[in-house]
Amino acid sequence: MESFEISADSYDPSSLTSGGYGQRTPEPSAQRNNATQSETKIRQNPAAARQARPSATPAAPAKKPTADNVSTRRRWKLFAGITLIVFAAYMLIVCVSYFSAGADDQSIVQGRQFARISSTPEAVSNTGGPLGAFLADILLSQWLGIGSFILIFYVGALGISLVGLRRMKFWDLTYKCLLTSITLSILTGFVTYTMTSHNFWGGNHGHLVNEFLITNTGWWGAIGVNMLLVAAVALVFLRELQTAYEAYRNRVKKHRERIARERAAAEARRRQMEAMMTDDEVATADNNTSDKSSSDNKTESATPADRAAETMTEHQPAQHHHEVPTYTPDTEKRYEQAELTDIDTIADDNTTMATDAASASATAAANWHETVNTTPVADPSPVACPAETMPAASMTSAPVSSETADHDTNDNDNKAVAPVTASAAPASEDHNITPPTAPAAIQPDELPQPDVDLAEIPDVTEAEDETASAVNLVVNTPQAVAEARHISNEPYDPTAELSHFRFPSIDLLEKRAQRTDHVDLEEQEENKERLTQTLNTFGVKISQIEATVGPTITRYEIIPEAGTRTRSVKTLGEDLQLSLAALGIRIIAPVPGKGTIGIEVPNKDPQIVSIRSILSSEAFQSSKAELPIAMGSTITNDVYVTDLAKLPHLLVAGATGMGKSVGLNTIIASLLYKKHPAELKFVLIDPKRVELSLYRKLERHYLAALPGEDAIITDTSKVVTVLNSLCIEMGKRLDLLEKAGVRNIKEYNEKFIARRLNPNEHKFMPYIVLIIDEFADIILTAGKEVENPVSRLAAVARAAGIHLIIATQRPSVTVITGAIKTNIPGRIAFRVNQGVDSRTILDQVGANQLIGKGDMLFSCNGVIDRVQCAFIDTDEVKAICDSISDQIGYCEPYQLPEFVPPTAEGPARTGAQLGERDPMFKEAGMMVVETQSGSTTNLQRKLAIGFGRAGRIMDQLEAAGVVGPAQGGKPRPVLMDIMAFENYLQLNAIN
Ligand SMILES: Nc1ncnc2c1ncn2[C@@H]1O[C@H](COP(=O)(O)OP(=O)(O)OP(=O)(O)O)[C@@H](O)[C@H]1O
């Protein structure tokens, strides 16, 4: 049963004894205080006292509750409650006993008064004695049969409520219990109808009802009635059933997730064991070989790769023997000999390879530790932290650059370790892998028992081909070679980390009745006639008129007779409005691509376009767009789907209450139904604090945030920081695109997925959609500080996969400035109050003729479509967010780069030093950020200035946050990239 709460409409059985109806009795002292307070007020203000009196007939003065009568009432309640509970328990015992004793007792109890039963010399078998036998017979045989158990439950529940153990709504409990007991009685009567027994299990009630039904309606009639009753009960308990089902689903889901985690951990264990054992085999083989051959030969033939393998083997624990490896003099000797042969190459190789190898082994060991530690304790919070829980997944999913592999194999063996290192431990900095500890730190007893039979491990063989030789430093068994090949050939899966992620179900969205006949023919004919008449009156002759019925408006397309000027029709808007007695008439003269003039007239009975119908449409489902957004329905009832990635930015404007927020929710929902959390991140700016707050739940799946900051920015002062941070992110991304030799994020990600980019330098990039609700609030407070980064993002961010959606209810030129507007070709205009606002948004009138409630004009590169925006309500948004946030997410929101606002450095940095900025400051800064080297000597040399001046400029750059503090003789660290520096220059008006 649900947990019952006290509510105004609930009837508290306790009131039977207290004389009150569902009112919570205040504590005596509080009550006294209240009484005294109100008395005082009344005395002070007799008028208020009169007002305070109920307007109805003055009731008898309420009896003042005293401590005495309150506690008496309590005692009575307690007594009544306990009595009911005891009675229910007794009834339960006697009824259960009836199952075994009923048949024997029947001859004694049936048809007799209780007085006779108790005086009869025959002993009854019921545990509850003669009274028990009597009552059980009444309940189970004569009344409701099995259904009587519900009545017993009811009595017990009332008792519990009176005692105060659990509060219940009296009427709710009563009708549910009655309905269930009657249904159970009839259903049992039906099921046992043909059964021969000493009584009817549905009681006389159940039997008689079924007898009546079967006699009058036949068996099918009885079946039908019984099914109806069951359905009624199911409906009554729908909420409870749903809750139970949800609880069951959650349990199953959690169970599955746990199993998946365990499997991933087991797989990780297996891979690590294989890798470690393989290394050990290599070491053994090499040792054998080196023992046999002469030391000279060894020196000549030893390739850097072999030597690294030796070194690495030496540094690795011999896991399957449970021994910590020792560094033998023999190994050292070989190492020294190798060094003597080619001191330079070997020194380099060995340093890198030993480090890599040790790091691979240690990382594997570190990962192993974590696997061992984390596997048995299934983390209940839905978070996927790759470093802790999924080392194997990270390992296999870390892309290996084939370019790198080729290059490495040919000319630089030490880099050939890279694929191996990548396969042994993800190199991506995003994955927060714990820095490797020294292998010796691993205790033998901490190491796992290999779950692989050692006898099954094939002998060490030579690398089979070039690819294998690239990886044969640690992977030498055919099995491992095959595995390594498999790893490097398999496309990178960005969704692997949240591979169990399920997109929200369409069923979360409400089904809204959609009528096809929403404009009846009569209305159409009437409108056609009026249009024709009015146009005729003004001298516009029509040769043809046709209607296209949309969800909220109907477009009448007319073909005027030859010689009619289109302009003359355009001016007739108000007259048509008058004749049709309708607001929101819009004239399109001519309809683009057609030789007609369109007159759009609102329907008398507009339809709501449900988000469910739009998102489940074929057009959306099969859309191949990178960032598909399904906005709603067009005039021809087609689903309007567009690609945000191609727009590439969107301005959403309209007067208050015309559907902007719903529109934004529709856009977000479209993206949530199509993009995996790995592929898309939102940056949400919501100065109104309420519109986007529902999405806070998505922070570990879909939101990007500044380090340590809230994922949804509501504070206007933080907006500048986040926008600048996005500029830095854009700069970084553009750098990566340049390095990868691609033109946009799509090509870049494709290349990365195909493992054609080195994962040490590159990473998979999710799209970032920046949504600013109520842009006017922000730009009017922060002005240029916001306008500059926004226009920079609008101008350049497209290629980097950063897209802007800017919403405002004040579409004036001070808000949507020229600089912003030029770079935002996608515009959505909901109804606005004036034509001038429409011009600001769309560069033409029209939005002022819309009808509101999601009626909008979607303009892209000058082409305007009238669309009825799909409607999504808050509950649907909540349901979507819940279904996502219930699933495992990332450890934290996607981290945006940190941006230190120049003003935040305080007057020490922005005052005197920057005031006396050197004329070569900008040039010097550019040089520093371009070369990413904060060397004063460099500045001195390249700018041909004295050391003193170069030093002063460097100090100024430090004050501006471009470089870090001096580090002895070493160059200073560079803290900004080109984008950030350019931004800094702009913000500080440095030319
Ligand atoms: N697409 C739609 N279909 C049907 N009704 C809609 C639609 N969009 C909005 N409405 C109706 O208009 C009301 C206001 O919508 P919404 O909150 O989106 O307006 P708004 O422009 O965001 O207002 P504000 O700027 O004041 O926040 C909604 O509560 C809803 O009743």
Image: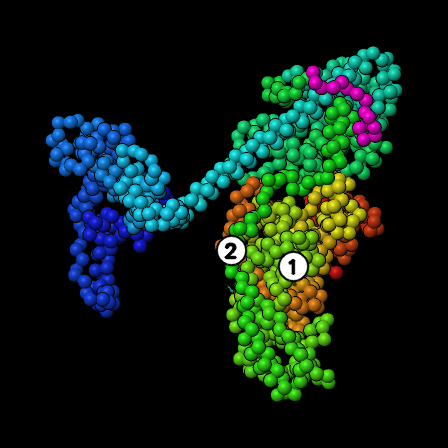
Check the image and name the residue furthest to the top: 292
Q: Which mark is residue 902?
A: none
- Examine the residues drawn in magenta and state their main secondary structure: loop
Q: Residue at x 69, y 53 (%)?
A: 624
Residue, disc 2: 510
Measuring from the top left, give residue 240's x and y in whole percent. 40, 45
Amino acid type, residue under disc 2 in the picture: Glu
Measuring from the top left, give residue 149's x and y in whole percent. 29, 38
Other residues around mark 2 within 10 Å, as few (<14) / some (14–19) / many (≥20): some
> Toward the viewer: 213 or 915?
213
Give left or right: position of 750 versus 195. Answer: right
Give the mark nearest the N terminus, 2 or 1.
2
Q: Is residue 457 magenta?
A: yes
From which residue to which does the magenta span run?
Answer: 455-469
CA gap, disc 2 and disc 1: 20 Å
> Is 162 placed above or below 819 here?
above
